[in-house]
Amino acid sequence: MERTLILIKPDAMQRGLAGEVISRLERRGLKIVAIRMLKVSTPLAKKHYAEHEGKPFFKGLVEYITSSPIIAAVFEGNGAIKGTRQTMGATNPLEAATGSIRADFGLEKGRNLTHASDSPASARREIALFFGDMPPTAWKRDTDAWVFE
Ligand code: IDP
Ligand code: MG
């Protein structure tokens, strides 16, 4: 089954929306296989967002993601990567689909509440970055057969 990394960013934490984010992914049928709270260091932020280095928003992005603690989690399920990105919504909350987390709780790209891996290669890289020392726990959930065909 596919795995994806999600981050509940500082704004979502400060606004008390961590449970909301986790709950929406769980309700969708995705299974938590790893979760931790941490304060992202500047080196980790720069590694995680390496693809954006040199862009005008990069400095602000690093300041944002390191500004207060976050929750990192790995969710598992068929379609986990695409499904999670869909539940989060487009990067710009004003363009995110109605009913998505970013549309329901956000207004600006620089305060868009969550991160989710965008491909299997990114998911592998990001899971290693945030959970290299604490590998996800594979487990059989009793409801799996009612979510996955
Ligand atoms: P994604 O999070 O939807 O994958 P990316 O394009 O990978 O979006 O950008 C990473 C993060 O950088 C975004 O989630 C957002 O927090 C921030 N970001 C992207 N573009 C901008 C911008 O134009 N202004 C401010 N922040 C931005
Ligand atoms: Mg991205």
Image (spheres, rainbow, N blue to C red):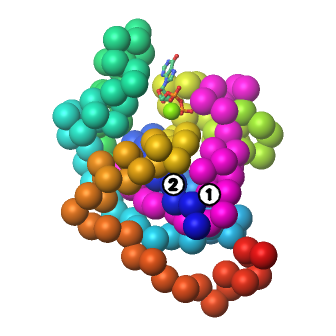
Is residue 146 highlighted in magenta?
Answer: no
Name which residue lies at 77% across and 37% down: 97
Residue placed under numbered mark 2 in the picture: 4
Mark 1 and ligand 1: say if the CB distance to the nearest ligand atom is below 8 Å: no
- The answer to whether residue 24 is left or right of residue 66 is right
Left/right of residue 22 with respect to residue 144 in the rendered view: left
Q: Secondary structure at mark 2?
A: strand
Q: Residue furthest bottom?
A: 142
Q: Secondary structure at mark 1?
A: helix
Q: CA distance from mark 2 to mark 1?
A: 6 Å
Check the picture and name the quadrant holding the C terminus.
Answer: bottom right
In the rendered image, residue 122, in percent from the top left (x then y), is placed at 46, 42
* Percent position of residue 93, x then y: 65, 30
- Measured as percent of width and height from the top left, residue 40 is found at 26, 44
Q: Residue placed at 42% from the left, 50% from the top?
A: 124
Q: Position of residue 12 (x, y in %)?
A: 49, 46
**Of the pair 149 and 10, the residue shown nearer to us:** 149
Q: Which residue is mark 1?
A: 80
Q: Is residue 135 above or below residue 126?
A: below
